[in-house]
Structure formats: structure tokens, C-alpha cells
Image (cartoon, grey):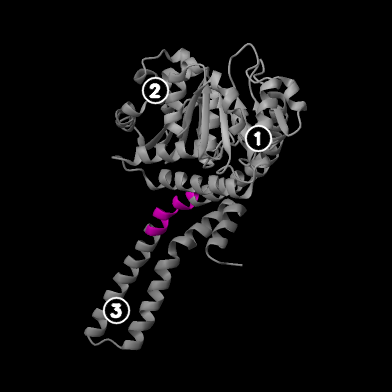
Amino acid sequence: MTLLALGINHKTAPVALRERVAFGPESLELALNSLLSQPRVQSGVVLSTCNRTELYLSVEQQADLREQLVHWLCEYHQLQEEDVRKSLYWHQDNAAVSHLMRVASGLDSLVLGEPQILGQVKKAFADSQRGHSLNSELERMFQKTFSVAKRVRTETDIGANAVSVAFAACTLARQIFESLSDVNVLLVGAGETIELVARHLREHRVKNLMIANRTRERAELLAEEVGAEVIGLADIDSRLAEADIVISSTASPLPIIGKGMMERALKARRNQPMLLVDIAVPRDVEPEVGKLPNAYLYSVDDLQAIIEQNMAQRKAAALQAESIVVQECGEFMAWLRAQGAVDSIREYRTQANDIRAELESRALLALQQGADPQQVLQELAHKLTNRLIHSPTKSLQQAARDGDTERLQILRDSLGLE
């Protein structure tokens, strides 16, 4: 039995190819059935995200197995092998286990330490279990991986610091306000970055959220998702004073919030402080706003400095995480190797029990026929000893005759000889 990992990811293939190799939720079961029907494939898990498609397999190893699996992948997606082959990577046994642990821990992600991948790996495992039985080695590999990823999250700071603009903006707000649940937040824009900001804020239980956007329809879709009020850009002047935090990211060529507008808002707030995070390029908030008392303005460059500092901290945490993966992978491989001895141990024990049962039966028969009990017992002990040490004795003699001192020492150790 061999463990394999075969796939492509954001490091090896452009998005155009990753899209063509991906397995959608609607086709996953069909793909698994097809994959598991391949010769020598015992069980498998398919992981498919926007950044990677990977097959984790337990197989009977053969020389041409790699070619067989590459052919299956390309045939299933109706792709030319030469278009895919150069982007594929292949890991076996220890390397496959280590790769899965690194993936689940966020060490192989586009954004180092991102937490979403663990949930995606768990879902892939659950989807592959549904209707398909995984053998114990592959199942144990995934269960071990989940505990490793949890340990990495618990014992390192790899996921503790913001490394996206949206997350950094929310982290900055949390640093300034003790609790976000009681503050009023105004989001200006409704693009991808503001969507991410809104979702982060919802996770932090922000109750009072306004979204101002040029197009109400787009803002209303986001507002419905996060429970926000929608206003127009023209309403910002009259509603700005309500906001304790303003986070803005639009494509406007001119500033949306000017110094005069901000002065009016601060006056209405009786100079209660306001945090403004301007993620837009060009800027949505006039730079002069940052000079006003009680207006704390941060630009995308300020956030980038936070991100770079946090990324450096994540890289330092990644070194600690890598050592955890190495340790845990070694423990799993030791367990896996021990499984290889299970059949031999079972066979050896069965052989010894058969010998014991045979000689015990003969001894009981002799007692029933009136033989001297002491003589029967001595004969049983003598024959049992001879039968049990016969094969080890032959192996010791052969190793000595061959001058194989290493094998001789291994035999002595296995027999408990000093």
C-alpha cells in the first residue's frame, strides 16, 4: 500500500488551467466513482478549490501508475496531457503526508496561514467518505492532518495577523474600539473589498451598518447578506456624523469625503473621535481630513505597512509550524510502517498457537491413555521449546555462516539476546 498526492495549484498553473482541472460539487461523486474504478486505486479523496485540485490516494504501487492517473485526469476533463503534465506535482508516502499537512495548515496557500483551507480539506474528506469507504491508512492520514492543523493554529501565530487589506481594515478598527458590536459603521462602495470588509464586520457582531454606493442594487444585495442599511452617495453628507468608523473603497476618480464635509460631521458629533480607513486608489477621502482633531485617517499605504509587518510575523510563525509538520509527519509514518508488521505479527502468533494446540492435544491424549503425568509435562515443555526456537535457530546459523553481522545483530535484538 502506497499513499500518493497528485495535483496542480496556484504555484504551478495559471487560473485558466486550474479552472479546467477543477471538480465542481455537482460532478464530484461521479469523478470519485470513476477514479476509484481505476486499477490499483484502493481509496481516494478529491480536493478542489479555486487555487488547487489535488487527488489523495491509497494505491497498490506499480511502475506505470503515475502515467495511468495523469491519463485519467486529462481524459476526465477532456484535456491534452501535454497541456497539463508540466503543471502537475506528485508526492509519495512521507512527501504526500507532509504535503497534505502543510496544505491544511495554510503553509502552502496563496496567502500564508489563511484559515479557509482547513474547512475545504475537511469538506473534501467528508464528501469523499459519503458513499465511499476509505481504507484505514488514508482515513488516519486525514484525521492526523486535522489534529496537526489545529495544533499549528493553537501553538503558533500563523493566523493571528491581518494579511489582506479588508482584514487589516477590520483589525485596525478592533484595535481602536474595544468592541465593534456597539459602534456605527459606514461602508462606502460595494465592490469585492467592501464585501470582504462587511463579512468580517458581521463576524465581529457589528449591529449598526450602513452601505453607501452609487448603484443601490449592488449595495442592496450585500446589505441583505450582512443586515445593513443602504444609502446613496449623496446621503453621506447628512449621515456621516452617525458613523464611528468609515471604511471606503470605490472607483471614484475624485474624493467622496472632503474636509468640509468632515468638519460638519465632527461638529455634529461634538468632536467624538471618528476612524476613517481609505482603501481606495485614487483616494476617497481628502488627505487634509487626517489633520482635523478627532479624525483618524488611515490610507491603503498605512494598511500595507501593517500587512507587511504581519506577513513577516506569519513567516516567523511558519517556521515553527513547519517543525510541527515534520514532527507529526514522522509520527504518522512510524505508525504507518508499524501497520506493515501487523500481518506478520498475526501470522507469527497464529503459527505459535497452532504449535501449542497440537502439542497440548497430544499431551492430553497421552494423559487419557494413562501415561506418567510428570513425563508428559516434561515432553510437552521439551517439544514446545524445540518447535518454537527451530526457525530462529536456523536463521541465526545462516547469518553466522554468511558472515552477515548486521542481520545476526537484528536477529539477536528481536530474540531479546544481549
Q: Is residue 149 above or below residue 262?
A: below
Q: Is residue 326 left or right of residue 223?
A: right
Viewer can see residue 96: no
Q: Is residue 50 left or right of residue 365?
A: right
Q: Give whichever of 146, 63 is nearer the camera.
A: 146
Which image quadrant: the N terminus?
A: top left
Residue assigned mark 2 = 73
Q: Residue furthest top?
A: 253
Residue assigned mark 3 = 363
**Residue sitting at 59 percent across and 33 percent down?**
242
Which image quadrant: the C terminus?
A: bottom right
Q: Quadrant of residue 98?
A: top right
Q: Give whichever of 1, 100 is nearer the camera.
A: 100
Q: Is residue 154 left or right of residue 60?
A: right
Residue bounds of the magenta highlight: 336-346
Look at label 3 and name its amino acid: Ala
Look at label 2 and name its amino acid: Leu
Cα distance in 3D space between marks 2 and 1? 62 Å
**Residue sitting at 31 percent across and 27 percent down?**
26
| Label 2: few (<14), some (14–19) or many (≥20) C-alpha neighbours in 10 Å | some
Viewer can see residue 56: yes
Q: Position of residue 406 (x, y in %)?
A: 61, 53
Circle 2 or circle 3, nearest the eye: 2
Mark 2 near mark 3, Cβ–Cβ under 8 Å? no
Q: Is residue 223 left or right of residue 126?
A: right
Look at label 1 and name its amino acid: Arg
Residue assigned mark 1 = 269
Q: Earlier in the sequence, mark 2 or mark 1?
A: 2
**Residue sitting at 39 percent across and 20 percent down?**
71
- Give the prevailing secondary structure in the magenta stretch: helix
Q: Give whichever of 167, 319 is nearer the camera.
A: 167
